[in-house]
């Protein structure tokens, strides 16, 4: 038996790494130190969380896709509940889209002009700028320039918007 250096309780070490502290005390000490470090370094924590979010994006999407495939009834039920619960928000969004000068109105007009330009042949779809996939979305860096478009596949387009959300949060 060995005495723990934190609580002075007797314990039997499982291996050479746990010679001075019991497992319970090590966990408590680690959690306490981790929490205080996070409180002292909020900017570093935010940076670490950003990196973790971007690094695990594909893995989370894969798990999400698998869940939707395995449980379509749950996803459908959630969608119906969400639709009913957010009727007022959708109505407000639709109102914003119809008020000239609002961001949603400008986005809507920009998308309409871009769609018209593609249909009329003025604008031609190109492969994704990042991965060269053929199925692409039109991404606007500036909604006041409807013909200045970056062609991105759905995956790269989602990554681009995720990076923008993190940048502006």
Image (cartoon, grey):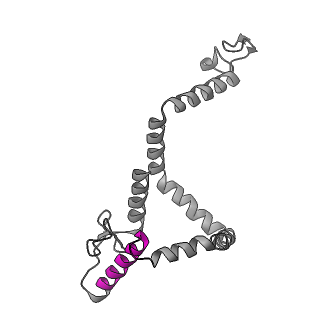
Residue 84 or residue 121, whichever sits in front: 84
**Residue 15 image point, x, y percent:** 64, 20
Q: Is residue 60 left or right of residue 108?
A: right
> Which quadrant holds residue 136?
bottom left
**Residue 16 image point, x, y percent:** 61, 17
Q: Quadrant of the N terminus?
A: top right
Residue 100 or residue 30, whichever sits in front: 100
Q: Is residue 113 left or right of residue 155?
A: left
Residue at image point 61% right, 68% down: 69
- Whether 1 is drawn above or below 76: the answer is above
Q: Residue furthest left?
A: 122
- Magenta span: chief secondary structure: helix
Residue at image point 24% right, 84% down: 122
Number of numbered discs on residues: 0
Q: Residue furthest bottom?
A: 120
Residue 106 among those drawn in magenta: yes
Residue 3 among those drawn in magenta: no
Residue at image point 56% right, 64% down: 65
Residue 68 or residue 98, whichever sits in front: 98
Look at the image and give the residue range highlighted in magenta: 100-118
- Whether 30 is drawn above or below 109: the answer is above
**Residue 44 image point, x, y percent:** 44, 36
Residue at image point 66% right, 73% down: 76
- Whether 68 is drawn above or below 19: the answer is below
């Amino acid at each position: 038996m060995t005495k723990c250096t934190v609580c002075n309780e007797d314990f039997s070490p499982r291996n050479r790494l746990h010679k001075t502290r019991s497992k319970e005390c090590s966990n408590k000490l680690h959690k306490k130190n981790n929490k205080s470090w996070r409180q002292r370094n909020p900017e570093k924590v935010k940076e670490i969380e950003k990196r973790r979010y971007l690094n695990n994006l594909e893995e989370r999407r894969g798990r999400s896709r698998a869940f939707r495939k395995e449980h379509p009834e749950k996803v459908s039920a959630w969608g119906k509940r969400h639709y009913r619960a957010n009727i007022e928000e959708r109505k407000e969004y639709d109102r914003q889209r119809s008020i000239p000068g609002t961001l949603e109105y400008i986005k809507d007009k920009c998308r309409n002009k871009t769609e018209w330009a593609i249909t009329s042949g003025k604008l031609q779809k190109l492969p994704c700028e990042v991965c060269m996939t053929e199925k692409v979305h039109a991404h606007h860096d500036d909604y006041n320039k409807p013909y200045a478009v970056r062609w991105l596949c759905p995956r790269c387009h989602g990554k681009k918007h995720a990076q923008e959300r993190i940048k502006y949060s």
